[in-house]
Amino acid sequence: MTEPVLSVKNLSTHFFTRGGVVKAVDGVSFDLARGEIMGLVGESGSGKTVTGFSLIGLVDAPGRIVEGSVKLNGTELTTLSEKAMRTRRGNEISMIFQDPIATLNPMLTIGQQMKLAIDAHERLSPQAAEARSAELLTQVGIPSAKARLRAYPHEFSGGMRQRVAIAIALLHRPAVIVADEPTTALDVSIQAQILFQMRDLARETGTAMIWISHDLAVVSSLASKLAVMYAGRIVEQGPTATLLRDPRHPYTAGLIASLPAMAKPGTPLTQIPGSTPSLLSLPPGCPFAPRCDHADDVCKTAPALTMQGNRGWRCYHPVGQDAGVPA
Amino acid sequence: MLGFIIQRFLQAVVVMAVMSVIVFCGVYAIGNPIDIVIPPEATEDIRAEAIRRLGLDRPLYEQYFIFVGNLLQGDLGRSFVYNIPVLELIGGRLPATLELVLISVVSATVLGVSLGIYAGYRPDSWVSKTIMAVSVLGFSVPSFWVGLILILFFAVHLGWLPAGGRGDTVEIWGVAWSFPTLDGLSHIVLPAANLALFKLAMMIRLARAGTREIMLTDTIKFARAAGLSEATILRRHLLKLISIPIITVFGLELGSTLAFAVVTETIFSWPGVGKLIIDSITVLDRPVMVAYLIIVAFLFVTINFVIDLVFALIDPRVRHGASA
Amino acid sequence: MSNTSTPLRRFWAEFRENKIAVVALVVVVVLILLALFASLVSPQNPYDLANLSLMDSRRPPGFVGTGGYTHILGTDPQGRDLLSAILYGLRISIQIGLAAGFVSLTIGTTLGILAAYVGGRVEALIMRLVDLQLSFPAILLALVIVALLGQGKAQLIGALVAAQYAYFARTAYGAAKAERGKDYIEAALATPLSARLVVWRHMLPNCTPPLIVVATVQIANSISLEATLSFLGLGLPVTEPSLGMLISNGFPYMMSGRYWISVYPGVALIILIFAINIVGDQVRDQFNPRLRK
């Protein structure tokens, strides 16, 4: 296989609060190939958003990356100066957020905001900048783009605003886009439209994508591979189809079992008992142990990563192994 | 847009009407103005005559309508003490107050917003902590006390600046102003600083709170994720977003500073309307009190109306009549 | 933070972490005690004319007067020991501040909760009035009311209350309204629980934290406003000089360099207000969930 565009090794981001150290991201590793879409799944507070911010170097104080490496096209990002990192942000790696109403500045026109994003990395004439902006708006499915450049965010619907945000993120054809739940705040029908448009864009432009979501159903329809996060760690990762069909980690299995599509009509949905632990008072060992049926004394030490082909998991008692050798 | 202006204009008219009722009832109905006009040893006849002449024998609502009728014709009555039309009296003093208030509020806003944005942008630096400590102090120290200290230090101890009066003035369109002359300017520095200090503290706190809040929003995070430099983010995003609360408060402060000028003008013998109203209150010169309150209320309402118009100009959401 | 403690103790534990706020609290308590026992700790009763001698007037700090003791802070134009006058003045200022604060709190909270609870036209009427008044500067209102009512302690407190109750009404209304909209209040009203119980058990407790914050700020403001009015000669009668009046009395002598008559009462006033405000700031920060991390 060719060199991955993004290679994350043992990334740890901790927050140094008054109450103690919060290990929001703890030893996360994955690779992303050109044009590949990876789903990063977990409950809220599992560290998936902090992982996203760590990749683009925007972790707010009192948090910081304490160890690990993020290589983008072969360049190590964690040791770059803020100035050098800024020239890559929005240019080689960009990010879009959950709430399109909050991301755009209500006081500036769409055209002005796109111009600011262009000026951050390139010197273009006003005409060229406008042409580029209009072209991208058209690409993300906004009709009469040229006229819409003069409009303000409040003149757009929620879905249209998110398209504008995506267009801004794509302005410089980045190698990687981190998408933090970009469709969660939208109607289901618009969600699906944007989802498939993003997949097509990734295919056409070769942009790789990390799709962060708490919704396994949404991600699995889009991503070719999955990483499941729990309490700051990736507890299982591998190709989407394999993971869905044959999960190893009890937590992944629980997530899949609680999908509405997996339930027999008329029967209650399966739940994972308990709730996410506070990252301040993590139990030693496997963080999922308190909620896990299979947990025993071994689980009091942290499980190492078990690799098998192109998949891996962190569990002493993986499930479903008698189902045969995975594909 | 036009609908918005008309709606705000009608609101302003209603507020003005309510204020006139409150002021009229408050000042005219409580107490008996006749005792001030007529010496206590006057005969019953003179007394009755005076009551009739002033219209005090009529029912309250009639008195009110006469008062409003006169008001609309620009007649606010005559001062008991100076025996000249009140409007003339106040009109002659208003420029001095406006000059003082505008200079104070504008300088407090410019300085306060800059310091506040800095303190909000770098909340943990020692400069910011110093700025904030000074602002709490500015909040706590009564305005009249600051005036005393300014006089004690700059006028008495150092002897650099005059302690009172307006100094040389220049006539522009028939109105006397202090700020164009060097002497006038030297007279205005201390009272303006006195008046500005409290507002400065307020603007610092407001700008700091606004900056801290805005810097945590997704708008700023998204701008950073797009690779915008911090300077651009501050200039293009933060300044635009923070302008809304700042302009609101600027309008409110312009009004309240007008009222606070009462204290400053007394300390620095600044011949504006504030000093006039204090003098009128001590001798219970009711027409002047009523006229002052009506004029202040009018300025208040006008300022708020203008601020609404400014909003409509700068905020696209208001301009397009979108609901927030 | 231990989790076995009462909310009050937890509150205190957090308060104690801010050393400046603790110092400010100690200062407030000491000043209140000094004011309370002014007649015991001050070297002279400044209101007893028999004690005063014009020979002693306007003497600088450290002067030994006809009474045979040292005037640590000097004397005022009537020959009063300034330290004694400050302690007695402190008593009046604190009295007025507390009285105005508590009356405003009571009236404002009642109006605010009434508006939120009853709703409809009563709500519209009360809140319109409150908003109109809030847009109008408090000092102007107080000034006019004092002018109309005349001088005296009760009148002054009345003016301060009229100028300040609106802040409490706004705050209580905001908090009570937010609670009123919640399902559990609707549920409580649907059960045969008396309305009074709903107000006392549910709405009032939820208004308490913001009201405490407003109360500290407003007590400081009352003291400051009273001093300002007295300085302008519109506050208390001369027989009961508050700190503001002491400052005012010394003002004419400032130009000739007799600074202490105005400056020391002013310093006492500022220390008092500053300390209350710092305590208030800390309490606000502790009540504000958004600043919690």
Image (tube, coloured by chain):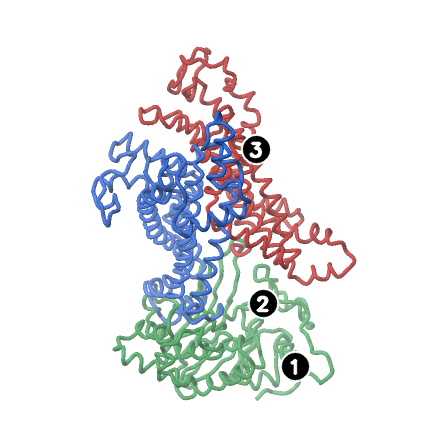
Q: Chain of mark 2?
A: A
Residue that badge 1 annotates: A260
Q: For the residues carrying marks 1 and 2, which lies nearer the camera in this image? A: 1
Residue that badge 2 annotates: A302
Residue A71 sits in which quadrant?
bottom left
Chain A tint in image: green
Judging depth in this view, the residue of B282 and C257 nearest the camera is B282
Residue pictured at 53% horizontal, 40% vertical: B57
Q: Chain of mark 3?
A: C
Residue that badge 3 annotates: C154
In space, the residues marked 1 and 2 are separated at their CA atoms by 31 Å
Q: Give the chain coloured blue.
A: B
Residue B255: horizontal and vertical position, in percent?
41, 49
Residue C228 sits in which quadrant?
top left
Judging depth in this view, the residue of A185 and C164 nearest the camera is C164
Residue A191: horizontal and vertical position, in percent?
53, 81
Q: Is residue C23 visible?
A: no
